[in-house]
Image (cartoon, coloured by chain):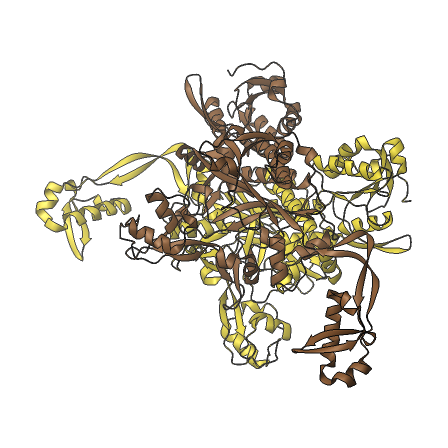
Chain colours: A yellow, B brown
């Protein structure tokens, strides 16, 4: 983590460790006034691009979910990290991290526990807190879900969801009904998810409570195709599994269309990589520090046909900010299997299909007297046989086995017939395409990529060059001084701009240069200054953060002009006669 | 709860009980596609009115918080309900609800536990589940916070926050620094809060996981005044404590200004009642089924100077949808006391104040030899005396008591003097004004008040008359039939309107009348139909939900027109030549 950025984040109200008055809690961060609004803006931009524009719809499910959901999803069994607890000081550590930090071994997470214990002994690893020996200390699986109980007692365990996705999957039957059983349809959710990390680190990059924005796009894999045309020409920086496995593996740049045509990326994943690329760029992710990396065969879940991560470079490391996964019918299949509900959709044929179906209608007045108590079972066996092997009814007699005994029944007593039946459709388990965004990591990336220093009039200036579309404070309004009526005018402008829905900061303390620097650090794209001239000409100075250039603007034009600048409908450079900062 | 509304809510994707595939979990609801967007829209409208326009800022704190926070806030001790567990079937019940449901007693929540036990015995109350006797069964306090543990082991208990407010209070030191120690300032938060109800009921009105929107406005009570002018003329329907205590108590209608001038409502509370009234009305709460009710002296917390609830009438009951409380310095005072941090702000005087301060500078070369081991304590006693009673130094000798003995010290050896000291300010504990909104209850109210039936062409029509500003689906787009190019045109319009940020439903199934009825039930304010004429004249039929009137609109004007209708900048009635539904 960049210490400068983390320090600025705390000082300027972006984010800070929670509950520091009580010593803080590791892995929990609070977004301050600037951070929460930046996060809101990122979420709104995501919603606009991945949901509204794509015609998908959003749901809002509880964060506390009952145990059976996670039995089905597999989280109860396998959502674990390897825990080793120091026998001396009692501190808990992630065993795989100890190995990675102290040996040349990478990706220790995938090493079996017994080998991890051996590696700890072989390398004589010690407790990072008190230096006690860890050789011989058992390594255990620690489930990363926060557990609680629903209602009094302990008979009804609940868990804080480890991903928002399960809240969508588990409600699929209701959602399919809402969508009138028509595939494809997409459901999104933005909300908190939880991971009870053993020892969290890395600021808001790895926290115990975080925000996800997930889209589950339910499709019929035999029919539905992504609308590739919409993003066909978007260029993607791709780091394929094949290239990663080479010594001199390289990124390739391909359009979405090329990536699909050349078989590099699954078409559904490619579509969302294209949508994603446009979105990251629009919120200010630096495309020179961005790539799509394919999961290696060992990383990918067995059910996933293709999986790519969007990665950004922050502080010299590549971090995952979004996972794009083709999840097949795995998730719905699990809930279909574990619950009593139906997770398929009924797919209507364009025209009903006529199929032949063999049935029996046994003559019970013959079977009963003839076979006594076995008659019912014999009738069932005949029915099963008719479905499986209608040739068995070709002769004079039909043989079936019931309870280890063989019975011969005259074919004429079975009521065997082949009928033509109309079928109007079939039940199919939809496949799922999932872009899963880590909002906190995207927010961190946006801040990191916006962090810049330059020199203004011989002084170093720190600024957050945030995109106007996401900047949490959009405009600062200053009276030159709070006297002779300038304060009143500035406060009136502040109220008007707020009524127009803009996030405005009013500031009348310190000299103008200092106030500009403060807003540069906050990342405020524009500042408005009311000076003595304003009292005469009803105009103000509008100053742009990045260029520090200024133009004079009538007060009456301000709200429309700023709204246009925020929406990207005009640029500062297009305004009349900019003059250098005074 | 209205069964019709709850049924419509499930069928049309507003809300439904969570995880019904696994039998459901009581007290947990999922907002479906329409409900989640309605909730988003209500939250955005709240943010716009209570936050952006007021110049307040938002934060986003974790939902899991450590134990010391709730020791300080009092939730660990007192956030309880009375639990009685059936000895036969094991079902848990709220003891106070049992009494209310089976006797004439109201507000049983405030009855002490021992009396509750007696009442259960006296009235021979039985388990509603299995009819077992409950007389003699102990009633216990059950803490309503969901408990979990942070990290491995059980040494670090954490709780799901029972209110978003604590996430603001606990970070006050950081937030005051952000606000550069200048009162007043306001901090908002919208997010999940939790209450582990013993036996939840009443749909989304009383749930275990809910969404709050809270504003904590930090003020200096000796100086800050609300900007009453902004809402002075807003009319409030008030049901004061005084009126509630009368047999024939009545509501009074007062403007905000009158309510303050007549001493009915605290000025800060009155300001937010005015803001609130405007807001509820804008999102579609029926003002004939809305009132402000003052807390009775017994309901109000001891630290609260005034407290009013906004209440809406749903299904014949009045329910609290917002609490407006003047919380004084209670919350910050508790954290100031329990934590090591400082929860005051340093209030700078306009001009430094010169104050006289009496000090001593005892001559230890005299005190030491003269009083030996007692010399140090005597020096301390002199200092305390100087602060408290400078007249004691008027004579030749000063008398102090140390360890039960009296000592006389020559005044000249005490180094007594009175100095003038400049003080630049003082530390003050801010007061808090808190509007606390229950978003789920507001959403329920908006739906309930929008639910209407009327008759169209002899058929009963159900519709949600939602305000365009909050309606989750804003426009339905239909081709008359999906053939001869009408489907293509309708899909193109759908894409264009989505790109303009509008929530659009595309529907080509069933006859047009049926599609209109479907959208009427969803509450979609407008529908657009592409017919054969559209292929000739590039125009479509725009139909309004409530009046069912229709106008013809050029396709090229649609996005601007609909945006204006959503923003309230034009009304359907203002459009040209409306004609009755065909």
Instruction: Provide residue A124's location: percent of width, then percent of height.
Output: 59, 81
User: From what the image shows, is residue A181 above or below residue A303?
Assistant: above
| Residue B539 sits above or below residue B476 on the image | above
Residue A226 visible in image: yes
Does any portion of residue A251 appear in the rendered image? no
Residue at the (65%, 78%) spot, across then down: B404
Relative to A216, residue B465 above or below: above
Along the viewing direction, whichever of B452 and A124 lies nearer the viewer: B452
Image point (39%, 53%), residue name: A338
Residue A170's x, y, as percent? 45, 48
Q: Where is residue A351 drawn, in percent x and y?
A: 41, 31
Check the image and name the residue furthest to the front: B395
Q: Is residue B339 above or below residue B294?
A: below
Q: Quadrant of residue B177?
A: bottom right
Residue A542 lies, in percent from the top left, at: 83, 39
Say whether residue A310 is left or right of residue B509. right
Question: How many numbered marks does the figure carry?
Answer: 0
């Amino acid at each position: 983590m960049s210490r400068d950025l983390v320090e600025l984040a705390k000082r300027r109200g972006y984010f800070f460790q929670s509950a520091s008055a009580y010593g803080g809690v590791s892995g929990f961060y609070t977004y301050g006034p600037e951070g929460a609004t930046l996060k809101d803006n990122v979420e709104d931009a995501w919603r606009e691009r991945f949901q509204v524009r794509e015609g998908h719809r959003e749901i809002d499910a509880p964060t506390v979910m009952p145990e059976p959901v996670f039995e089905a999803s597999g989280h109860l069994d396998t959502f674990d990290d390897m825990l080793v607890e120091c026998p001396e000081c009692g501190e808990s550590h992630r065993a795989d991290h100890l190995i990675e930090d102290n040996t040349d071994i990478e990706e220790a997470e995938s090493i079996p526990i017994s080998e991890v214990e051996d590696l700890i002994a072989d390398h004589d690893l010690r407790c990072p807190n008190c230096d006690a020996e860890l050789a011989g200390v058992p390594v255990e699986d620690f489930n990363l879900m926060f557990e609680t109980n629903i209602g009094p007692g302990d008979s009804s365990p609940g868990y804080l969801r480890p991903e928002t996705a399960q809240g969508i999957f588990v409600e699929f039957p209701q959602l399919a009904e809402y969508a009138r059983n028509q595939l494809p349809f997409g459901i999104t959710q933005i909300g908190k998810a939880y991971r009870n990390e053993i020892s969290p680190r890395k600021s808001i990059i790895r926290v115990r409570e975080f925000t996800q924005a997930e889209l589950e796009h339910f499709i019929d894999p035999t029919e539905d195709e992504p609308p590739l045309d919409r993003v066909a020409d978007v260029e993607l920086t791709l780091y394929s599994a094949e290239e990663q496995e080479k010594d001199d593996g390289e990124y390739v740049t391909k359009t979405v269309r090329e990536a699909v045509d050349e078989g590099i990326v699954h078409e559904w994943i490619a579509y969302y990589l294209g949508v994603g690329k446009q979105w990251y760029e629009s919120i200010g992710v630096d495309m020179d520090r961005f790539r799509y990396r394919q999961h290696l065969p060992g990383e990918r879940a067995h059910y996933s046909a293709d999986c790519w991560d969007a990665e950004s470079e922050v502080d010299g490391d590549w971090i995952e900010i979004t996972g794009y996964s083709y999840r097949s019918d795995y998730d719905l299949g699990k809930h279909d299997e574990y619950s009593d509900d139906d997770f398929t959709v009924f797919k209507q044929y364009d025209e009903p299909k006529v199929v032949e179906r063999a049935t029996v209608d046994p003559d019970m007045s013959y079977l009963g007297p003839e076979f006594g108590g076995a008659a019912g079972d014999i009738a069932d066996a005949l029915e099963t046989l008719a479905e499986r092997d209608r040739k068995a009814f070709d002769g004079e007699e039909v043989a079936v086995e019931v309870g280890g005994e063989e019975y011969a029944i005259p074919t004429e007593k079975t009521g065997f017939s082949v009928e033509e039946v109309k079928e109007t459709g079939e039940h199919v388990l939809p496949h799922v395409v999932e872009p899963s965004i880590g909002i906190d990591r995207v927010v961190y990336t946006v801040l990191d990529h916006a962090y810049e220093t330059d020199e203004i009039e011989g002084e170093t200036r720190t600024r957050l060059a945030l995109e106007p579309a996401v900047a949490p404070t959009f405009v600062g309004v200053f009276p030159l001084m709070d006297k002779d009526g300038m304060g009143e005018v500035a406060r009136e402008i502040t109220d008007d701009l707020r009524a127009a829905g803009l996030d405005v900061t009013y500031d009348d303390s310190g000299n103008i240069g200092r106030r500009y620097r403060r807003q540069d650090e906050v990342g405020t794209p524009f500042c408005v200054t009311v000076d003595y001239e304003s009292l005469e000409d009803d105009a103000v100075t509008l100053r742009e953060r990045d260029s520090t250039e200024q133009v004079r603007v009538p007060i009456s034009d301000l709200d429309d002009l700023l709204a246009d600048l925020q929406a990207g409908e005009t640029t500062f450079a297009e305004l009349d006669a900019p003059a250098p900062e005074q």
